[in-house]
Amino acid sequence: MKRADRTGRPTRTVGLLICCLLVGLGGVNSLFAAEVGITDTTIKLGTYQPISGPLAPYAVLGRTIEAYFKMVNDRGGIHGRKINLLIRDDGYNPANTRVVVRELVERDKVFAFVGGLGTPTGLAIMDYLNDHKVPHVSPASGYSGWAHPPKRYLFAQSTNYAVESRLLTKYAAEQLKAKKIAVFYQNDPFGKEGLDGVTDMAKRKVLPLIATVSYERTDTDYASHAIKLLRSGADTVLLWSSSKPTAALLKEAAKIGYKPKWLSSLVNLDPVMFKLAGETWEGTIVASSYTLYSSPEAEPYRQFMRKYLPNEPVGGFSVGGYAMAEIMTEALRRAGRDLTREKLVQALETFKDWNGVMAYNITWGPNRRQGQNSIFFTKAEKREFVKTSDWLSLD
């Protein structure tokens, strides 16, 4: 037996026993549980996207996030790690979202989520992710409930529909000289939040709201909706509706000679609308919370699209995907090599008036989870969106 030191502790024997134990357990790292989804060489992220179903055209957002991370990996990754994004199809069905998100968390062991698309789908898993302390960065939806009240692990990026709807109403009154407005909206939290903002502005005597017409996500015929709007006498219609219902409504309105001014939520700032709605889309005013894809400032984005997504159209939901990915990349960089979920949260809370290429003026903090509060307006002209205002906010 080896002699003990002056404190009575065996020296060499204990040291040898510890070394043997470490070898038997696979080394020092095995004694300490690594953060979920993190290895020495990889960061595993997850997202849910409508690859199938009524919003399939929007799934380019997820493909863009994936391609952006490929660009990051091609440049060496983040602190020596490559990003692995797992994309799951939920078909824009909240029941499916619950299933795929649970699988990503409990089976696939993702570190965090980025850019999950949709309001009803996001609501289906919001509490689950927060309860499991899994960060979700930049959900692809402007629903105000992501950030109000604040939730520790949920970081909303885009200007919410409550702000957007009030600014759209104000723009209709002051710039378009609208007299009577109507709202066409999806009958879920996305559409209702837009409606609530317009209703609030009407109560403030900004403009009279004379008609509200809703639709269900399962609807396929919009003739009756167009007739209701025509009969209302509204000279301006504000839209909180996804791409296909929006295009169908405008075509039905044209058939019956109804030609109001159309103003749309930012969800329709997408070149696909020129294809879906044809000439009826001309002149529509559409909000934006990202750098305009055709602007000089967006050249790095356009170069990225040419190299990594050459078969996808420039603009639309790829813009949001790019912005969400660049935000997550910056947050992971700030969090450092010793990466944990809590350090990611702390890193996100350091964002202050941060601009990326496509992301604009993002601020988060310990008690703030709404990243952005401003938008600008564009006009659909000759198959392009032309900027018609500066950045605007309610402040």
Image: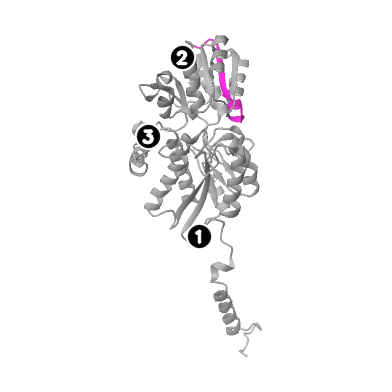
Residue 9 located left or right of residue 19: right
Q: Position of residue 40 (x, y in %)?
A: 48, 61
Estimate the spatial distance between the alpha carbons at disc 1 and disc 3, rounded to whole Å: 34 Å
What secondary structure is marked by label 2? helix
At a point 56% along the width and 74% down the height, the residue shown is: 22
Q: Nearer the viewer, residue 250 or 373?
A: 250
Q: Nearer the viewer, mark 2 or mark 1?
A: 2
How busy is the neighbourhood of tag 1: few (under 14 within 10 Å), some, or many (20 plus)? few
Q: Position of residue 114 (x, y in %)?
A: 52, 44
What secondary structure is marked by label 3? loop
- Give me the disc on residue 370: none
Q: What residue is pinned by disc 2?
A: 254
- Give me the disc on residue 314: 3
Q: Nearer the viewer, mark 1 or mark 3?
A: 3
At a point 57% along the width and 75% down the height, the residue shown is: 24
**Could you tell me which quadrant the N terminus lies in?**
bottom right
**Could you tell me which quadrant the C terminus lies in?**
top right
Going by the numbered disc 3, the residue's amino acid type is Val
How busy is the neighbourhood of tag 3: few (under 14 within 10 Å), some, or many (20 plus)? some
Q: Position of residue 159 (x, y in %)?
A: 52, 32
Residue 2 found in image quarter: bottom right
Going by the numbered disc 2, the residue's amino acid type is Ala
Q: What residue is pinned by disc 1?
A: 39
Can residue 251 be found in the magenta stretch?
Answer: no
- Residue 285 shows in this picture: yes
The vertical placement of 301 against 189, above or below, is below
